[in-house]
Amino acid sequence: MTTATDPRLNAKIPEGAIADKWNNYKEDMKLVNPNNKRKFKIIVIGTGLAGASAAATLAELGYQVDAFTFHDSPRRAHSIAAQGGINAAKNYRGDGDSVHRLFYDTIKGGDFRAREGNVHRLAEVSVDIIDQMVAQGVPFAREYGGLLDNRSFGGSQVSRTFYARGQTGQQLLLGAYQQLARQVGLGGVNLYNRTELVDTVVVDGRCAGIVVRDLLTGELQSHAAHAVVLATGGYGNVFFLSTNAMQCNVTAAWRAHRKGAMFANPCYTQIHPTCIPQSDPTQSKLTLMSESLRNDGRVWVPLNPGDARPAAQIPESERDYVLERLYPSYGNLAPRDIASRAAKRAVDSGRGVGPLKNGVNLDFAAAIERLGKDVVQERYGNLFEMYERISGENPYDTPMRIYPATHYTMGGLWVDYELQTTVPGLYAAGEANFSDHGANRLGASALMQGLADGYFVLPYTIGNELAPLLNKPIPGTDHPAFKLAEQEARDRYSRYLGTNGKRSPDWFHRELGKIIWDNCGMERTQAGLTQALADLPPLYEEFQSDLRVTGDGASINQTLEKAGRVDDFFQLGMLMCRDALERNESCGGHFRTEYQDEEGEAKRDDENFAHVAAWEWNGDPMAAIRNVEPLEFETVHLATRSYK
Amino acid sequence: MTASHGEHLTNLTLSVWRQKGPDAAGAFESYRIDSISDEASFLEMLDVLNEKLIDEGRDAVTFDHDCREGICGSCSLMIDGQAHGPQRGTATCQLHMRKFKSGANIVIEPWRATSFPIIKDLMVDRSAFDRIIESGGYITSQTGGAPDANLIPVPKPVADAAMDAAECIGCGACVAACPNGAANLFTAAKVAHLNLLPQGQAERHARAESMVETMDEYFGSCTNHGECEAACPKEISIDVIALMNKDYRKAKLANRKEIARS
């Protein structure tokens, strides 16, 4: 195992003590004069929290910004579905929170597999995010005195989570969307809706622009720019069933990977403990119930396998409050990976609840007795309603049934401290990059990271990159590299339409998802991963020869869009399994059953795996090259994660 | 995959509006669903239909959808003549087949509103909503200049009322349900959200005037039918329209330069 630093994987962490690095960076960085900013064109792909906030802020600064979304409106981006909240080290509770503590919790929560410098900056700017969003009118929850309210989330012992009922992501996204809409109205941003990235273009080692497909007409179009930001979310839909929205996909990141952007830690995927269990084979997606429910809900299963009595008839003495028993100091607020595995083991031991015995109880009876139904309704009313609409059961009367589901992907495009990928001029922000959450993300930290990247990091770091390029020409869309990328994309979509096989894209997606979930899901083994790597290539070949896409390529065709996305998911799926197989340790969301202690907790191998695996495209995902960025811990001490 | 534990509905007939493009003539086509679990969502039932159509070599039905959790506002559909179907306070994606009966004939149409032109089949163009927001549905606050969040106390009842309005998902059911195709509930929800908050006061009148007048460029006029509130998946109250109308009247006076200076 080599751990020599690859020069391409230089994270460019600024000098100084951990708390000074970001300030040192800002003091040293190069600036672009306000009158010169308009000479630079920046492309932003995706309009979720990271993309919308980046596009709006860059336009405010004076850059020419082109923003692209495959949705009909920027407001539909999947950030909107985040429920529980956003972390910030405001210490408004006076309960001992600080920037350092948020930094430490995030490093520890990520099982010591994230880069210190990036994470500390995230904790620093978290406080600015709350100020910014309140100024924009985000209606965060308030106390009667008018000040902001907080709640607790998993993996922390302070209350630092700001929230807007169970719709925090919605309200934050609408805030960022409105700021973006203002710039669209003012002419600072050209917005392209229903337009999907199909390739990135690299000329002389620099990102020169993108090729997009107009989803309404099928037309391919090139756009050149000085810098391109991918804020295109995660790849959780590789599992087919996940809590991601139906259209979430890896295509933008994957196409960038194929053009030279290394893909880091693809095996770090997060399984969220509180989702509604699958109820039906036609199910298209899983629905998350906010982790905030674990503030007041108690997780339990019957003590005895096969106990089929309704919850109310099972006496206290015959209940196993799994998390409270195993992790007394964190209890029901243990981090997501740990809570998920505890639920899986309870179900695997035959103690699952519900008609299919595929869930665990999340019981609010004690909270209702302690706080009253009104308070519980105030806190979680909309979540309870959502649960009832989906399951047909009323959680005020009977416990919710929950089970883990894929929710978030910590892996993503490798980026340095400036959020630049291994392709100069190409940036990745939000869930699309890999940088801040290590092997496991803490609750309420995704919103924080998306907005940190878009509002408070990229607007600085992109300027530093662009300043030396002032008045230097960049390749135009008539450059042969653009024409070639357009032709390749045209051929690709023609191929999907012309295969004339028998199976729909969804059929292949479902089969792919089954292999990935069974072998690269909550628990992974060498045998399972080896099997998956044997099964995936033939299935992918079948996809290429037996795909059926009906309709045409010159008007909106959702079947054709799906085919392109499934194609890229296949390739990513292979890389994920390879990454999981090579990482011979357990850490955070990556749990290899071979590497656990006597109590079944994840066993890291810091000697051999305290590094980022950054995969390099080599023509075939099965042949991708594994490069390594060693992680250096100067501030925190590597320790076994304990939440007991 | 697990087996279903719910009941199955059988012999459903779907009458679905098919239209190849914005300028093409459309027509209803009839499809059979032999059996579907009552645990399936309405859109999963359409997924099943689309898989069947692709198997038969036919074009899948085009419809907007994404989060399937009732929050992104992508899904639409008039189901048996009702925006988002029969369940109150529920977007189409959260509607489940247990609300239907075996043997039913279900009529599925796109949003009915000239301001939302049909793109294909059940998909419509709602971008006029974005134009309304772009005209003033924001608080001007450039990144980086905000004061500490707790310097702006917001009384809890005010924050709650703003949040009630801010829950709008921008789906367009209000417009589709309105006999006049008016967008007053959508527009007023945003005006109320921002105009109720202390942070929104500086632009209160400019916002009301600009958003109302942009709305009037694209949409019909409100005549207080109240169908919008009944169709709204977030059950936003038409009280917000009263607030918007009040602010608009005041704005027409307040926005005159001589008065703003006094």
Image (cartoon, helix red, strand yellow):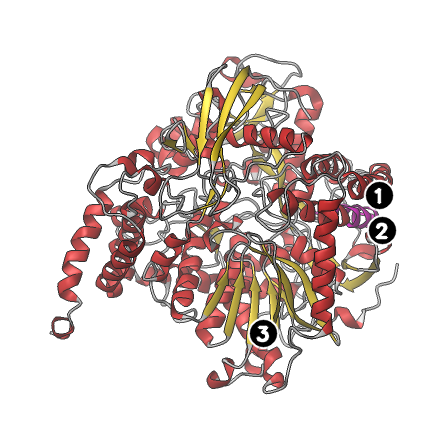
Are labels 2 and 3 assigned to the same chain? Answer: yes
- Rate crowding at label 3 as few (under 14), some (14 to 19) or many (20 or more) other CA atoms within 10 Å: many
Work out whether residue A165 or residue A470 is closer to the camera in this orientation and state it. Answer: A470
User: Relative to A43, does residue A605 appear above or below in the rendering?
Assistant: above
Q: Mark 3 — on which chain does it sit?
A: A
The quadrant the N terminus of chain A occupies is bottom right
Are labels 1 and 2 assigned to the same chain? Answer: yes
User: Magenta part mainly helix, strand or loop?
Assistant: helix
Amino acid type at mark 2: Met
Residue A48: percent from left, percent from top:
52, 55
Q: Which residue is mark 2?
A: A622
- Rate crowding at label 1 as few (under 14), some (14 to 19) or many (20 or more) other CA atoms within 10 Å: some
Question: Is residue A129 visible to the viewer in this orientation of the structure?
Answer: yes
Residue name at image x 78 percent, y 36 percent: A598
Cα distance between the residues tagged 1 and 2: 9 Å
Q: Which is in the foreground here, disc 2 or disc 3? A: 2
Q: Which residue is mark 3?
A: A461
The stretch of residues the image draws in magenta is A572-589
Residue name at image x 47 percent, y 32 percent: B94
Cα distance between the residues tagged 3 and 1: 40 Å
For mark 3, give the secondary structure.
helix
Q: In the figure, is residue A154 to the left or right of A639? A: left
Q: Hey, which quadrant is residue A450 in on the image?
A: bottom right
Residue A163: percent from left, percent from top:
42, 48
Q: Which mark is residue A537?
A: 1
Q: In the figure, is residue B11 to the left or right of A207? A: left
Q: Hey, which quadrant is residue A632 in on the image?
A: bottom right
